[in-house]
């Protein structure tokens, strides 16, 4: 056998991203190394794996598609060797691919992943960020092992383990009239310019807050990027609705934002772990899920003001 497992991993990354540049970013290796690995595989296997189109990136050939299926099995079997050895000598090692909801990732993932790999130095956590639908697709295709996301839409075939509950709130700039209030109602905000977080499932969740009150919001702008909305809010464009509570009260440009409680009985977003029901969980994944249960709760969430802490701040 004149190819390596590493070359196979580079091939998988390129096939799934459709780009040598994106594959390079995913596996944290140089683009020339990716190109060399693919060229070596094509030469060794005596077949073309990709069709190279400048405008559309790389597309798998029929042979490449067939190889991708077997390549994933090969990597999975290789990973199982580590698991067998780990169970035999009681040492935890191996790689886990963690998906995380894009609105949660900047706060949760760095501390959570670093704490786990510090506790188990022979492990590695690969991080994948996406919206809710994208994470479910990647779980179904085995591109990620487990995901941290919300409970808004978890289809049949997936398990959801709740970790922490985040009710919605209103975010405004520090000179906005609402900034001086302890709470506002949906009726209070309906006619104000709403800057809507435009992500699948999240978008419908926020609009449903108005629908259950028989109101229609005045949507002034939309963006799938949470940081852009926070900066627009800080600059006086309007307000936004959110569930995440970053510990920082500043936007990306340094201006301040103010969190205001949304009065009424509104469905919270519940942070939790999602994984496929039928897929066997390795010891590494089970340990990581237990790690998440220990480090994410209503009392503590990495990078955020947790719900219990929020209540104490309001009481003080």
Image (cartoon, rainbow, N blue to C red):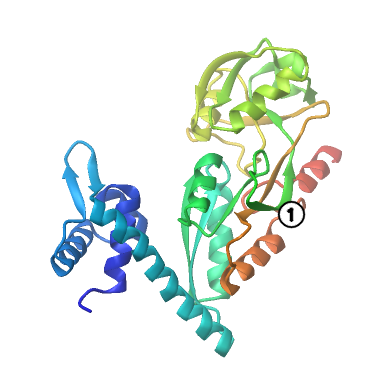
**x, y percentage for residue 102?**
52, 43
Q: Is residue 224 visible?
A: yes
Label 1 packing within 10 angstroms: few (<14), some (14-19), many (20+): some
Quarter of the picture containing the C terminus is: top right
User: 127 or 145, which lies in front?
Assistant: 145
Q: Is residue 131 visible?
A: no
Q: Residue furthest top?
A: 191
Q: Which residue is mark 1?
A: 297
Residue drawn at x 74%, y 22% as measured from the top left: 180
Judged left or right of residue 29, residue 149 is right
User: 32 or 62, which lies in front?
Assistant: 62
Residue drawn at x 34%, y 65% as measured from the top left: 71
Residue drawn at x 57%, y 36% as measured from the top left: 250
**x, y percentage for residue 233?**
57, 24
Task: Please identify the quarter of the rendering in which residue 260 is found.
Answer: top right
Quarter of the picture containing the N terminus is: bottom left
**x, y percentage for residue 297?**
74, 54
Task: Please identify the quarter of the rendering in which residue 312 is found.
Answer: top right
Judged left or right of residue 33, residue 100 is right
């Amino acid at each position: 056998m004149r190819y390596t497992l590493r070359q196979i991993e580079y091939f998988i990354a390129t096939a799934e991203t459709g780009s040598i540049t994106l594959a390079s970013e995913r596996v944290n290796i140089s683009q020339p190394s990716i190109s060399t690995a693919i060229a070596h595989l094509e030469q060794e296997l005596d077949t073309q794996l990709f069709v190279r189109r400048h405008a559309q990136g790389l597309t798998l050939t029929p042979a490449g598609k067939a190889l991708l299926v077997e390549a994933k099995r090969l990597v999975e079997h290789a990973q199982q060797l580590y698991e067998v050895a780990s169970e035999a000598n009681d040492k935890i090692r191996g790689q886990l691919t963690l998906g995380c909801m894009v609105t949660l990732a900047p706060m949760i993932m760095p501390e959570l992943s670093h704490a786990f790999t510090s506790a188990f130095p022979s492990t590695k956590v690969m991080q994948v960020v996406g919206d809710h639908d994208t994470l479910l697709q990647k779980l179904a295709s085995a591109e990620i092992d487990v995901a941290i996301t919300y409970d808004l839409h978890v289809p049949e075939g997936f398990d959801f383990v709740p970790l922490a509950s985040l009710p919605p709130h209103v975010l405004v700039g520090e000179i906005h009239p609402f900034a001086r209030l302890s709470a506002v109602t949906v009726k209070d905000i309906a006619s104000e310019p709403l800057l809507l977080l435009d992500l699948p499932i999240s978008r419908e969740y926020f609009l449903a807050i108005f629908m259950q009150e028989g109101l229609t919001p005045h949507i002034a702008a939309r963006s799938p990027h949470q940081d852009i909305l926070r900066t627009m809010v800080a600059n006086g464009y309007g307000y936004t609705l959110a569930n995440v509570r970053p510990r920082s009260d500043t936007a990306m440009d340094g201006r301040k934002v103010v969190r205001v409680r949304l009065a009424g009985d509104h469905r919270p977003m519940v942070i939790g772990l999602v994984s496929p029901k039928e897929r066997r969980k390795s010891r590494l994944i089970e340990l990581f899920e237990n790690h998440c249960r220990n480090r994410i709760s209503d009392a503590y969430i990495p990078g955020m003001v947790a719900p219990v802490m929020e209540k104490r701040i309001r009481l003080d």
